[in-house]
Image (cartoon, rainbow, N blue to C red):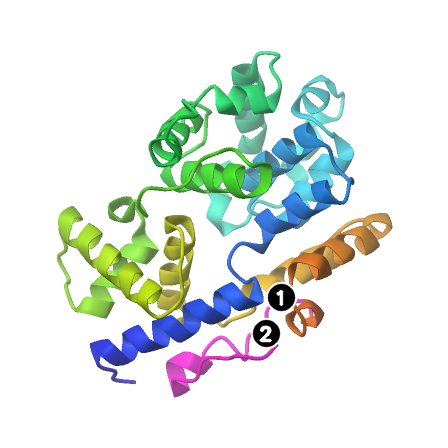
Amino acid sequence: MSLTEQDQLDNLVTFARLMVDTGDLEPWAEMIKQVQTMGAVNDEEAFWLVKCYNAYDSFHSAWGVFRKWNSPYVWARANDRDDAKQFECTQERRGLRGGRVLKHFDSYVEHLAGQSQRDWVTSGITGLDPERDFGNLTSWFRCVWGVGRQTAFEWAEFSGKATGVPVTAADAQLWESEGPRRALQKLYGNPSPTPQWLDDRATETRDYLISQGVTLPWEDFETVICDFNVMRHGRYYVGRHLAALREEIDLSPIEDRDLLLEAFRAIIPEPWSDIAPGIDQLKKPIYRDTGKIIDTP
């Protein structure tokens, strides 16, 4: 499928608008925020859920760990703490497989040093500049063993979205972010970009989205531009995140499924809140093969 630069930009606008309208951006962060709003978890438990999701990149695993040990300190003192390595780390967190997630959690508890998680997290920021503090927080998080650039970026993102830590990204850190970087390279036809070129094109693209009525913080711009690139390669469709989360809810302990499904339906609009659980493999190549962007569940 050969498209002009303008065609691709217009398709990006359509895609971005659908991602926002359907709640398909980072529904896991919204789920954590919603279960706290519903009174199912308290503030410290929400921070622990964020850390667990960040470690496993799986809501099913994060919720399972939380239900077994409802704080990092409970986990650290438990006789069965080694069971944490049995929960799935997805491909995004493959570096913590093989039991290395235990070393990661040990490092986290060591850095907490008896503080509340909110106190420890907010020790990494000034509270004066949300954009500068986003960068400060990613650096702060990287002191924990096993936390790299992407993990730190997403941990800071979820800290803002799910637990209200006052941070927001000043840019998309594109030079160190392979998916979004490749998306802009392909969109504008530059196989050898410089960091400045990437920043300029990212700002230009984000400004174009804003001009078309789709305003995205940098955290969400990174998600949108990355997923758009993945869709061009036949591996994504609007609703894929929602379908994955619905499946993770169905894999959660049976006694929690009604609660989690209620939370899901509270954050996702109809008809997308009734999306079938599980990623639909037949939908993934549709845009690549036909140029059609799926706009129904």
Instruction: Look at the numbered disc 2 and give the secondary structure of its residue.
Output: loop
Query: In front: mark 2 or mark 1?
Result: 1
Please, is residue 122 above or below residue 173 in the view? above
Do we see residue 234 in this rendering?
A: no
Instruction: Look at the numbered disc 1 and give the secondary structure of its residue.
Output: helix
Name the one closer to the observer, 159 or 88.
Answer: 159
Numbered badge on residue 280: 2
Give how far across and how far down residue 280 sits, in percent. 59, 74
Give how far across and how far down residue 174 sits, in percent. 28, 49
Numbered badge on residue 243: 1
Give how far across and how far down residue 21 sits, in percent. 53, 67
Please, is residue 231 above or below residue 225 in the view? below
Residue at image position (36%, 38%) is 149
Do we see residue 27 in this rendering?
A: yes
Q: Where are the magenta residues, as a range?
A: 277-297
Report the Cα–Cα distance between label 2 and label 1: 8 Å
Q: Magenta residues: mostly which secondary structure? A: loop
* Circle 2/circle 1 CB separation < 8 Å: yes
Name the one closer to the observer, 68 or 25.
Answer: 25
Q: Residue furthest bottom?
A: 290
Q: Residue furthest top?
A: 113
Q: The N terminus appears in which quarter of the rendering?
A: bottom left
Quarter of the image for residue 208 reads bottom left
Name the one closer to the observer, 217 or 288.
Answer: 217
Is residue 156 toward the left or the right of residue 83 in the image? left
